[in-house]
Image: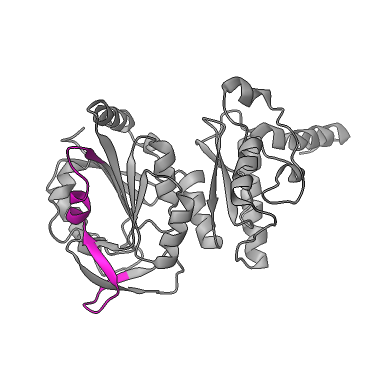
Amino acid sequence: MVNGPSTIFAWLSRLLHLRRAVGLPRPRDMPGVFRSAATPCTNLAYRRAGAAHPVEALHRAAARENRTQVMFTKMTHQQRARWTLSWLYRLVVNALDSTPNGRFLLLTPPVLDRQVILDRRTGATISVHIRDLIDHRVAKQIFADHDYAIEKSCRMKEMGDYYDRIRKAGKIPLIIDCGGNIGMATRYFCEMFRDAAIVCIEPDASNIAMARRNNPCDRVSFLHAAIGSVDSKARMSDPGTGNWGLRVEHAEDGDIPIVSMRTVLETYDSAKYTPFIIKVDIEGFERDLFAQDTDWMDDVPLLVIELHDWLLPGQATSNNFLREVAKRRRDVNFNSENVFCVSNTLL
């Protein structure tokens, strides 16, 4: 409870220093969003660490994009109020916490289409774009909630050692993002694994266009297709859950190609690339992906998958995956809504 003016002033002082604590710029320091000049960076902690201050990174990003006005996401007034308060609460908690949880921090409110994310390990910032509330929730899951963080796995050290062995062998770790959506997971992997090549596979044209925008990195390649057990064709369907719930179904006259995992992996010369992580979030189509031709699982140390029995009850969409895992020496761990399936043969 607040007891008297002194306590009130103490808390106001802490909140006023919140911007300085997280490196969050003042409005006049953000030429990429507001029309005004920037002031010099004075945060010595970042300079001593040899890292770029978030404000300076914002200046460079703004100059590259030549932004002159605020661009807002598509949300209702109620959504803007609710999710901005949620973002602000998280920002305050992380700023006042002496041992903040997680590597990344969302610096900009969800009402803005350009999201700036602070990498607390390096002091640098990441700039990505969102269109609406769904895109914001995707960014939050990946960068704020750390849904794909292998640091949360009890096999973290073994995964790190395997990654280092790939690099020491002169090869490139390969990460495949199946169901890439707007490229947030792809960007996360790109930031976390700086020597890896990443493939973003996404069947929706609007989503993969956003994925390309969010990943201006030459280590990332894009495949406008669905992933399945055999090369085929499909059509998209929208059950009304928005751009993160689009589904794929086989159709001979479909306009979306389905590529098999074998086809994707054969594109990358095994003398140069070694599979490291395959992430799968394909809205129930995992039933098809694991229906046949699953020998590729033996070469992947970490398979991260979201199963969708909860979304499609009675359809047993996870059965084929569970059957194939049961044939192999693999551990199964859980992180949020994802299954981390780790090979006990490779690690």
Q: Which of 333 and 227 is in front in this view?
A: 227
Quarter occupied by the C terminus: top left
Q: Where is residue 139 in the image (x, y as percent from the top left)?
A: 50, 51
Quarter occupied by the N terminus: top right
Q: In this view, does 228 lie to the left or right of 65?
A: left
- Residue 267 in the magenta stretch? The answer is yes
Q: In this view, does 22 lie to the left or right of 155?
A: right
Q: In this view, does 284 lie to the left or right of 75?
A: left
Give the answer, above or below, for where 163 lies relative to 322.
above
Dividing the picture into quadrants, the one containing residue 174 is top left
Dividing the picture into quadrants, the one containing residue 99 is top right
Residue at (32% x, 61% y) in the render? 282
Residue at (17% x, 37% y) in the render? 271
Dividing the picture into quadrants, the one containing residue 156 is top left
Q: Examine the rendering and report whether any part of residue 301 can be seen.
A: no
Q: Which of 20 and 147 is in front in this view?
A: 20
Q: Position of residue 299 (x, y in %)?
A: 17, 42
Q: How many marks?
A: 0
Q: Examine the rendering and report whether any part of residue 31 can be seen.
A: yes
**Magenta segment:** 248-275
Q: Nearer the viewer, residue 311 or 84?
A: 84
Residue lying at the far right in this picture: please name it: 5
- Residue 175 in the magenta stretch? The answer is no
Residue lying at the far top in this picture: please name it: 48
Give the answer, above or below, for where 198 lies relative to 99.
below
Q: Position of residue 89 (x, y in %)?
A: 64, 46
Residue lying at the far bottom in this picture: please name it: 253
Q: Position of residue 45 (x, y in %)?
A: 64, 23
Residue at (16% x, 61% y) in the render? 291
